[in-house]
Image (tube, rainbow, N blue to C red):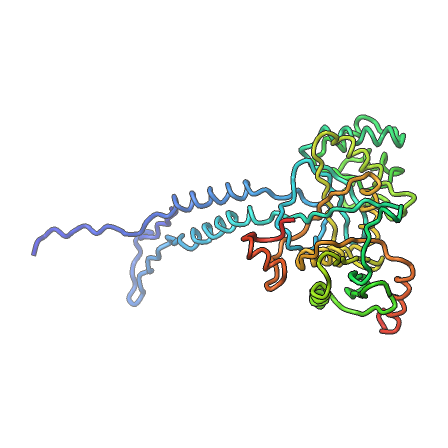
Amino acid sequence: MPKVKLPRKSTAIDMTAMCDVAFLLLSFFILAAKFKPPDNLAVQTPSSVSTKIAPEKDVVMITIDKEGKVYFSVSDANKSQKVEIIDAVNTAKNLGLSAEEKARFSNNPTSYIGTPFSQLKSYLSKDPDQLKGVALGGIPVRDTLNNELIDWMRAAAGAFQGGRMNIIVKGDDASKYPSFQGVINAFKKNDLMKFQIVTNPVAVPKGTELFKINEATGTKGATD
Amino acid sequence: MAEMDTSGGGKHKKGPGVKKGKKLSTRVDLTPMVDLGFLLITFFIFTTTMSQPTAMRLFLPKDVDKPEEQNKVKSSAVLTILLGKNDVIYYYEGDDPTKVQTSNYKAIRDIVIDKKKRTDPKDFVVVLKPTQDASYKNTVNILDEMTIDAVKRYAMVDISPVEYGIIQATERANGVK
């Protein structure tokens, strides 16, 4: 028998490197995932068969929460329009907002308006941290004589003149019709006849008319 | 990777019957952790594009007060749908609100399709009248229903006090709170 034995080598692989790469990739995707800004307004939207994606730019968003309170906000990309809107409202309603208060609305990307004009100055004079947890009353819309959303929409229409304004309504399932009716009235009074409702996508039910139409044309959802 | 050296911590006298301490390996197998890591990655890869909310388009007709400019509809071709509280739907055909019938969101599809079949496609109109007790979800669902049933002409209008009175009477008769 030969005296030299074959040296035995270990077959266990060191997994450290692969582990590192895996976690690096994971961190990348977590950070790259666009999380919606923590919605100060939690809204459970209804579902619809529409497949049009909700627009993200040039957007004026009206949010209706489950208690029927109405909030007004503008997409972050439109800072100059936000400045115009708050200026227009300030002059029209004589609110006496200081430059700092106006900036609080126009500079903050997630800012929204949820108070009547009478409380607007005090609302804008506070820092967002001070407002955490404070329940706002919402913009009054249900009273036809005092529908403040009309003024906000007029200011928005003026600010977006010449360009495209996407109006979207994000309502909660549980809110009642009168708030929605008030919002629609505000649009009608400003001659804004086209708007979109934010919904969760669902598949077209089988056997319905729309399903048959889609099969015939080869489309996937409602594309009106 | 960290490895503890437990071999021979100094020679000590081995008494008879005392077993030598077993040398334990502290190398951890990291395969399951890498598996979980990749699972999480694939999860995030797939979910970052999926959560886009969709939008439903709505076009409002202009409010005209002059009766001659209002859209003329044949009353026999009209189906009026009234949205009440607790997800209840009331509907009637034509002009007479007193003949109102009750339905719900599941059955309304058959009713709309049935009326659509019986009516001339040129004249078929559905009028939607939500009451103040109807929820936003009801409103969006019925609008969605119009799209699903391919109803070409429909309008959302305010309910008249007469019709609301009839609904309330029906609710009382049926014991709806």
Q: Is residue A217 left or right of residue B120?
A: left
Q: Nearer the viewer, residue A48 or B80?
A: B80
Q: Is residue A42 left or right of residue A217?
A: right
Give the residue drawn at x 76%, y 39%. A112
What x and y, as percent, mark residue A10?
Answer: 27, 51
Give the residue drawn at x 30%, y 67%. B17
Give the residue drawn at x 75%, y 57%. B123
Q: With respect to residue B30, does A109 lie above or below?
A: above
- The reply to whether residue B70 is in sight is yes
What x and y, as percent, mark residue B55?
Answer: 67, 48
Q: With respect to residue B87, does B30 lie above or below?
A: above
Q: Quadrant of the N terminus of chain A?
A: bottom left
Q: Nearer the viewer, residue A51 or B53?
A: A51
Q: Nearer the viewer, residue A215 or A86?
A: A215
Q: How many marks?
A: 0
Q: With respect to residue A30, does B128 lie above or below?
A: below
What x and y, as percent, mark residue A72?
Answer: 77, 41
What x and y, as percent, mark residue A107?
Answer: 72, 31
